[in-house]
Image (spheres, grey):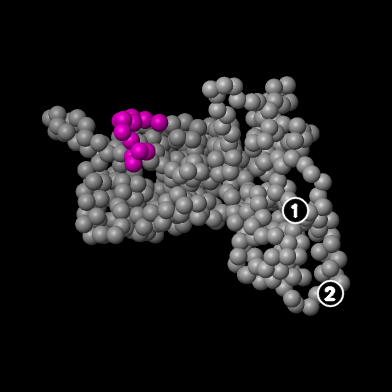
Amino acid sequence: MFKFKLPDIGEGLHEAELLAWDVKVGERVEEGQAIAQVSTDKVNVELPSPRAGVIAELPWQPGDVIAVGKVLAVIDTGEPGNGDEDSAVASGASLSAPAGKQAPRARVVAAPAVRRYAAEKGVDLADVSAGGPVTAADIDAYLSGGNAGAAKAEPGVTLRKLSGARLAAARRLETSWRTLATTAIAFEVRGEAIEAEIARLTSEQENLRITPVSVVAYGLCQALAQHPEFNARVDNEHDTLALHQPVHLGVAVDSEDGLLVPVIRDAQKLSTVETAAAIEFLAQRARCGALEAGDYRGSTFTLSSTGSLEKATITATTPIINFPNVATLWISATSQQPVVVDKQLTVGSLMRCTLAFDHRYLHGADAVRFINTLDACLRSVGEAG
């Protein structure tokens, strides 16, 4: 018997919620075959079987929260076992009633962080749930006497609850907004060099889509190398800012699961073409639901853009910092606007941008210096990209 223990599937995570089994007791599985779907605070994950064999025990049911290191499933590999293994299997199975013999109960869907919050407040999630995923706001409403989780739609009203990746993103954004002293500076950069670089690379790369995000990401990495205090992660527990030399660039991607932020590792080492290829690869995986937990880990700065979506002219926004990053940059599409060159009014290309940053560690003067460097890098992006 092989005891498949829940592995560490995320940065700093200690537990996961079982969403569904992909196999049944008695079913034959091959090594690498998906056997379960679990949800963490960050991402939904499909777990493959580490061994080939027959499923002997599935001691959990969907909705259970399982600690890392606990026996998730037992697989009969056909290899000789011993009494200690049998005892360990029984011990693991006793964490929950054996599959098929569990007392009926309603499944309560909630992220592990929400379950911990409920435990801290002494709240039974079954009392809060109305069949949809339970959030921290539902628990607060329940404690205040207004059970938002039990709300029912009135005629003409549709209730939409957060779940899955959207719920995980919501929790992170809420943490960012509550704990960081966020401020922002909106500015414009000239877009001629960016557009020229896109045209040049597009003519050279027939099978690769070169976008403004790719070009800006390359120039951004150059600027971050000169301002490492912006390429950093916040440690609220120790009131510390960790400055990083490598740029692990988070790039916001719009998907059916909401806004996802996969990470490009060591982005400062990539050319513009390599950056474009990395962004396209991650974006495709995000949109088909193929991102893994490791794809989200360790970002040191985040770049977001509304350029591909814009119909109206977006002039500014206030992006929420992707905690624990210390700063986030938003960019718009480039557009033709009136500009003054050598005291003459003419038409030029402009890209609108907003830099959001944590004012506890970075001040306005720091932000202006960084923006000046970024502007210079984007004006000369074609010279080194």
For discs 1 and 2, the disc positioned in front in the rendered view = 1
Is 283 placed left or right of 103 in the picture? left
The image shows residue 248 at horizontal and vertical percentages of 47, 53
**Magenta segment, principal secondary structure?**
loop
Magenta stretch contains residue 120: no
SS at badge 2: loop
Taking the spot 38% from the left edge, 41% from the top edge, the residue there is 305
Is 185 placed left or right of 313 in the picture? right
Q: CA distance from mark 1 to mark 2?
A: 24 Å
The image shows residue 326 at horizontal and vertical percentages of 50, 41
Q: Earlier in the sequence, mark 1 or mark 2?
A: 1
Taking the spot 35% from the left edge, 38% from the top edge, the residue there is 309
Q: Residues within 10 Å of mark 2 (few under 14, many from 20)?
A: few
Nearest to the observer: residue 17 or residue 233: 17
Q: Quadrant of the C terminus?
A: bottom left
Q: Which residue is mark 1?
A: 60
- In the rendered view, tell whether residue 207 sits above or below residue 44: below
The image shows residue 306 at horizontal and vertical percentages of 37, 38
